[in-house]
Structures are given as structure tokens and as C-alpha cells.
Image (cartoon, rainbow, N blue to C red):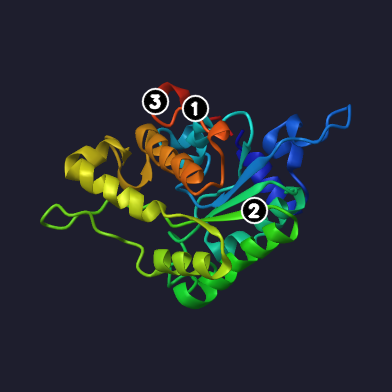
Amino acid sequence: MSLTRRQVTTAALAAVPLAVAATGPATAASPQGRPRGRTLYIAGDSTAAQKYADAAPETGWGMALPFFLRERPAVANHAVNGRSSKSFIDEGRLDVILAAIRPGDLLLVQFGHNDSKVADPTRYTEPWTTYQDYLRQYVDGARARGARPVLATSVERRKFDADGKAVGTHGDYPAAVRGLSEEEGVALLDIQALSIALWQELGVEETKKYFNWTDVEQDNTHFNPPGGIAVARMVGAELLRRRVLARRDVRRLDEVIPESWISWPEY
């Protein structure tokens, strides 16, 4: 279950636990004292975030990820538009997650789109120094609480060269995530490599059906429902392949997911 816009804003400003608000009553112990099941927390940017009615049909892949997971782990999507690994921490959003996360939970981290904003000191990080330093705070914070961190490279934008070849747009950031994953022994979901391969397979015109192309907008960064579903499927499959999740935890990886399953709350 995703956070509402109001819950995200209130929690970040107050820096208080959001265990129940983020994932519903099942995140707390039951009246009989039984422990809650696992929760998968997402820390990320607009490509993963919950979208609202004023942004439809824009779709974050975190909105579709629950379609590929069984009841547990539940998904607590804390990703927010425009955030980098740095600004997410500076705004207290990692603190909110760490106040709620419990032993056995998962923290899936995907940043990079906004870390490259050189002109914005509130968001910019350098791939091989500050970017890795900030990502380590997510890794260390999860581990200190008995949770398992998972790193993901940034999903690729839609960009092709004159010969129709899909082109990477993230510079050294994906390589820095791969390096940190190896150094820290953290499971890696290489969504950048998988997504650029899919865009190449689909080609210049077909990829428009996966991104937020409308009559008034040609957005090559954010997804529409088919794109959000496709990337969420990648994430689910990689969580299984990397043995972060077991076969019993996932579902529908080979099934068609109706676009109508995506919904956009009012706020």
C-alpha cells in the first residue's frame, strides 16, 4: 500500500514513525501479540513514487510493484518526486523509514536521476564520493535495525541516437551503485541495464507507449501505466533472481497486468 501525499509530507516534516500509516494495520503487532509480516520500503525518486490524480497518467513503478508480490512483503512506498540520495536524507525522509523499519524488513534504494543536478547544491552528489557516501547511510541504517538493504541502479530514460540505439543518460552513477554493492556486499538490482535493453528491444516508436507521452507532453523520464508495470516487473523478477525474495513471495511475473489496476488517489 502506498503513502498518500499528505502522509509523506507530514511524516517527513515531523520525522515520526509511519509504520501503521505506511503499510496499514498489518505492520503492527496483532491484538494477540503475533508479529507483523515483512515490509519492503522504497526510498527513491519520481520514477518510483506514488502519483496522484493531478499527474495521471504518470505512473511510478512503485505503484505497480505490489501486483508482483504476495501479501507479504507489503510495500511501503516512500519515494518522492525530485529527490536525490542527499535531499531525501536532508529532509528527514530516511529517518522516517528507519523509525518504522523492523528486523527482517527490506529497504530498496533507487536514486540517481536527481543526484546529477550539478546546478542544485541541495540535490547534487558526485558519483564516486558523496553519492556513495549518502547511499551508505541507507545501507548502514537498514542493517543497524536488522533489515536488509537492496540497491538498484536508476531506471533509464527514453533516449536514442541517430541510428536508433538506446543511449544511457546516467553517466557514472549506475557504475557507482554497482561498485558500492560489491564493496558492501549488498544485493544489486541492475535496473539501468535491464531497462535500456528493453528500450532497445522496443525501439524508438514503441517505447513512446511506455513513457508519459500525451497530447500535451512528451516526457521521456516518467512512465505511463504500461511503463510503470514493465519496470515493476523487472524489479520483482530481480528480487527473485538475486534471492532477496523467494518464489513464494512473488506472483504474476509472466502474466499480463491490466492497466486498469493502476489508480491515482486525489491526494
Residue 189 lies, in percent from the top left, at: 46, 52
Closer to us: 141 or 55: 141
Q: Earlier in the sequence, mark 3 or mark 2?
A: 2
In the rendered structure, the answer to whether residue 138 lies left or right of residue 19 reads left
Looking at the picture, does residue 108 appear above or below residue 21?
below
Q: Which of pointers 3 and 1 indicates the residue nearer the eye?
A: 3
Identify which amino acid the numbered label 1 is placed on: Ser
Q: Mark 3 = which residue? A: 255
**Marking on residue 57:** none
C-alpha span from label 1 to label 2: 29 Å
Q: Which of marks 1 and 2 is nearer the N terminus?
A: 2
Residue visible at 76% across and 35% down in the picture: 36
Q: Mark 1 = which residue? A: 263
Q: Do the residues labelled 3 and 1 touch (CB within 8 Å)?
A: no
**Quarter of the image where the C terminus is located:** top right
**Quarter of the image where the N terminus is located:** top right
Residue 91 falls in image quadrant: bottom right
Q: Earlier in the sequence, mark 3 or mark 1?
A: 3
In the rendered structure, the answer to whether residue 166 lies left or right of residue 80 reads left
Q: Are marks 1 and 2 in contact (CB under 8 Å)?
A: no
Q: Mark 2 = which residue? A: 148
In the rendered structure, the answer to whether residue 210 lies left or right of residue 87 reads left
Residue 120 lies, in percent from the top left, at: 48, 69
